[in-house]
Amino acid sequence: MIRRISSGGEFEKRVGYCRAVVAGGFVHVAGTVGQGDTVAEQCKSALAVIENALKEAGSGFEHAVRVNYYLPDRHEFEPCFDILAETFGANPPAATMIECNLIDPKFRIEIELTALLPDQA
């Protein structure tokens, strides 16, 4: 069974995707950008959107198994370290950071995450 979760974000209908897909015991959260002027503000905002999708799917950050961070400037990643460490706490997922362009230059970070459903953990 596949379940799709939409957050109503502006790009979902425009590009043709959903915020998250629940399938095979996993929650696959699409790359998510946040609002704000700084990378730290955008990181927190993106994590809040991801957290809502995980909750709707019946999971949470404690069940995250994989996370990818995309930044147009790798030097901006460090301000996110404490935010991410606090978010994942004692249950950090495997992670990758990639330096690349994002869909709009105003975005400083995009976060993509995969989590298990609790009954699969």
Image: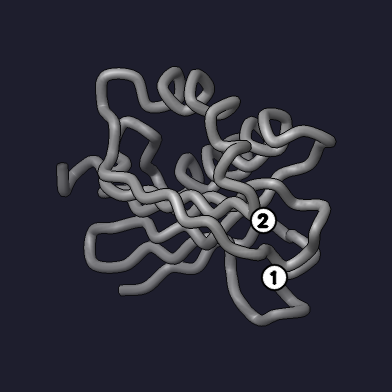
- Number of callouts: 2
Q: Are marks 1 and 2 in contact (CB under 8 Å)?
A: yes
Scheme of colours in the image:
one colour
Q: What residue is shown at x 58% (from left), y 69% (from top)?
A: 18
The x, y position of residue 67, in whole percent, is: 38, 48
Q: What residue is shown at x 45% (from left), y 25% (from top)?
A: 87
Q: Is residue 94 above or below residue 14?
A: above
| The disc label shown at residue 67, or none | none
Q: Is residue 120 above or below residue 22?
A: above
Q: Is residue 28 above or below residue 48?
A: below
Q: Please state, as top left, top right, bottom left or bottom right, where the C terminus lies in the image.
A: top left
* Three-letter code for the amino acid on which mark 2 is drawn: Ser
Question: Mark 1 against mark 2, which lies toward the viewer?
Answer: 1
Distance between the alpha carbons at the discs numbered 1 and 2 = 8 Å
The x, y position of residue 10, in whole percent, is: 80, 64
Q: What residue is shown at x 64% (from left), y 55% (from top)?
A: 72
Q: What residue is shown at x 36% (from left), y 56% (from top)?
A: 27
Q: Is 5 in front, or is 73?
A: 73
The x, y position of residue 25, in whole percent, is: 23, 59
Q: What residue is shown with label 1?
A: 12
Q: What is the quadrant of residue 35 in the picture?
A: top right
In the image as oriented, which residue stretches furthest toward the front?
A: 75
The tag earlier along the polypeptide, 1 or 2, is 2
- Is 70 displayed left or right of 114 in the figure? right
| The disc label shown at residue 7, or none | 2
The x, y position of residue 36, in whole percent, is: 81, 36
* Three-letter code for the amino acid on which mark 1 is drawn: Glu
Which secondary structure, mark 1? helix
Which secondary structure, mark 2? loop
Tell me if mark 1 has few (under 14), some (14-19) or many (20+) residues whose alpha carbon lies within 10 angstroms of its own.
Answer: some
Q: Is 68 in front, or is 75?
A: 75
Q: Please state, as top left, top right, bottom left or bottom right, where the N terminus lies in the image.
A: bottom left
